[in-house]
Image (cartoon, rainbow, N blue to C red):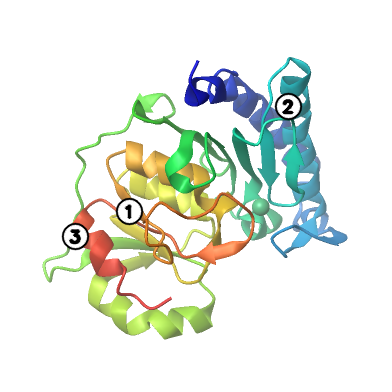
Amino acid sequence: MTVSDSALDADWLGVCRRAVVGLELVLAAAPSTLERATETGTRGSGGDRTLVIDASAESVVFAELDALSAAGHRFLAISEERGEVDYGDRGVRVIIDPIDGSLNAKRGIPHHALSIAVADGDTMADVVFAFVYDFGPGEEWRATRDQGAWCNDAPLDRDAGERRARDGRLEVLGIESADPRWVAASIDRLVGSAHRLRALGTIATSLCQVAGARFDAMLTLRNGRGVDAAAGQLIVREGGGYVAFPRFADPLGAPLDSAPSTPVIAARSLETLRELEGVPT
Ligand SMILES: [Mg+2]
């Protein structure tokens, strides 16, 4: 059996779907901003202040991983809050962001997502299974390496191209890490590249919008973490798009961990990917 077969041996889609059901209960139990804004008093491995809903959501996912481990599967879990948890095989990595878009979740803004990726190595190129569930619209995005990508079980159109306004600028460009200071630092290039900007507040979901050709492209304006992009980047590539992590010589060489290491850029064409690599970040 090859490594990649064993990585996919477990029922990862079942794990992810059960985790979604559990996370919906966590979110329903704390429906108001006041409840969702409660902090645990600690910081996650990525440095953000941990919300009680983040910690509860992570516990839901780890309960599923514990069950998988008890059934004999071995892997290494890497999660936003807990960092690395060794379940016996560092060759199979499970990269988890229990809630990508915590600020949205806290404020009741629709887009926030569970992101889970499974990899047979330690870089973005090694992701073999990807799952993003966006709790706002209730959309399930997933991909399997070399087999395609789906939204709510409908296959994504690999040939969906980009749209440009009459003046040649991209019709819709997603931006993330949209701190106004970083928007200001990038604004001249954004003026030249985009007819309209959209900032959803979750990297995983923004990547899925490129996968579905709703966005013509997206980029983060600062370094992001592997946990945010690990699943979404495979969904983009299996949906016919292109992805680059520009701090690395190998465009898919970014590490699957929870430290900020590189921006991420995704586009429907290679030409646009190259164009956006020129936006300062
Ligand atoms: Mg998170």
Considering only order in the chain, which callout, 2 or 3, is on the residue closer to the N terminus? 2
Residue 25 in sight: no
Left or right, 9 with respect to 272, comes to right
Q: Percent from the top left, x then y, of residue 25? A: 75, 34
Residue 41 versus residue 11 in the image, above or below? below
Residue 229 in sight: yes
Q: Which residue shows up at 19% across the image and 55% down it? A: 163
Considering only order in the chain, which callout, 2 or 1, is on the residue closer to the N terminus? 2
Q: Which residue shows up at 66% across the image and 60% down it? A: 103
Q: Mark 1 to mark 2: distance in Å?
A: 33 Å
On the image, numbered disc 1 is attached to which residue?
A: 215
Query: How many labels sit on residues?
Result: 3
Q: Mark 3 to mark 1: distance in Å?
A: 15 Å
Q: Disc 1 on helix, strand or loop?
A: loop
Q: Which residue shows up at 30% across the image and 74% down it? A: 278
Using a 10 Å C-alpha cutoff, classify the residue at mark 3 as few (fewer than 14 neighbours), some (14 to 19) or many (20 or more).
few
On the image, numbered disc 3 is attached to which residue?
A: 271
Left or right, 92 with respect to 81, comes to left
Q: Quadrant of residue 74 in the image?
A: top right
